[in-house]
Image (cartoon, rainbow, N blue to C red):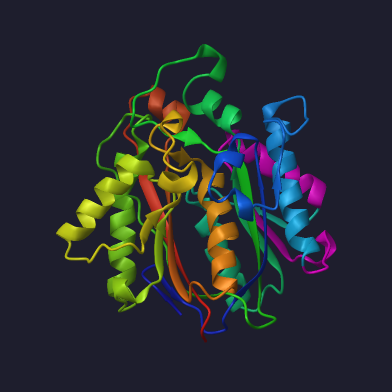
Amino acid sequence: MVRNGLCSFTTKPIIISTGVTAGPLEKMSPFARHFDKVYENERINEDTNEKGHMKMIEEAAMIAMSKIQKVPQNMDYLLIGDLVNQMTPSNFAARQLEIPYLGMFSACATSVSSLLMAALLTEMNFSNYALAGAASQHNAIERQFRYPVEYGAQKPETAQWTATASGVAIVSPFENSYPIISKGTVGRVVDMGITDPLHMGAAMAPAAMDTLKRHLDGHQEDESSYDLIMTGDLGIVGFTILKDMAMKNGLKVGEQFQDAGANFYGGDEKFFSGASGAGCSAAVYFSEVYQKMLSGQYEKVLLIATGSLLSPLSYQQGETIPCIAHAVELTMKE
């Protein structure tokens, strides 16, 4: 059932497998022990950043399929996206995988928008195996949206470090004892007039708050019923803003509130306000969060991935930064 962007899944789409790959700096992440593969160099032994980005997506997909003894020919859909021009790495990974492909773009919220689409296709009985996810590569994204890394441009404390990571999940109606996609909320675009691409957390926090409130109110849920409410990549600054907004809206903000971006590099100051990038939330959601659900540490979680919908062109034309946040609720109980 879907109304006003609120989705309730009656057929219990299940995340049956995941695959996560990451770059060399991501070894420093407290989540790294759950990553399936960590590379020794940023370009993944390819001759360009974008080709490395593509390879990272392809290998994350192959890892997820291998865990359930499946191959690309068994997949009904590939739903994936990234931040590079026209999602070039995803497009070329789709060329290699040869799975029917729907490119997804919600900026850094793509980890959840792709998961929602996979669940909807499963709910409508259009898919038995849908592979969904997102990815980012530090050098490729920094070059596109800010400055080439070689410039050595100085950044403020509000800036975030684009993670080199790819995370995918396979959604299926089969099997039991796996995390169930029970509910979701499709976000609305929120624009508070911020124009600084080095202050993304502040731009995205209002969109995260809007989706959080709509999910709780629309699905008649209480924030205290979740073992984890994790936003995507607000970073330390943006997450602080979100928590303040949540408290002003009467929510009880406890330890279950976390942010993937703020935690991704363990608070290391070298990474400024934390991680960002479409691969940030995807890597965390489909590694540690997924594993903790399988082990019984979490029974009910709410994942809210955030994205800033700017482009180099819109920024150069002086436009503000419209933002989006999508939510998905996972549970281990039927």
Q: Position of residue 34 (x, y in %)?
A: 62, 55
Q: Compared with residue 84, is residue 241 higher up or lower down, i.e. above or below?
A: below
The residue depicted at 65 percent of the width and 83 percent of the height is 176
Is any atom of residue 103 visible in this view? no
Quadrant in the rendering for residue 52:
top right
**Image check: 251 left or right of 30?**
left
Report if residue 320 lies within the magenta region.
no
**Image check: 222 left or right of 198?**
left
Q: Position of residue 89 (x, y in %)?
A: 68, 39
Magenta span: 68-97
Quadrant in the rendering for residue 220:
bottom left
Q: Compared with residue 240, is residue 251 higher up or lower down, i.e. above or below?
A: below
Q: Position of residue 153 (x, y in %)?
A: 45, 15
**Image check: 208 left or right of 46?**
left
The residue depicted at 70 percent of the width and 62 percent of the height is 77
Identity of the residue furthest to the top in this view: 151
Q: Nearer the viewer, residue 70 or 195?
A: 70
**Image check: 56 left or right of 238?**
right
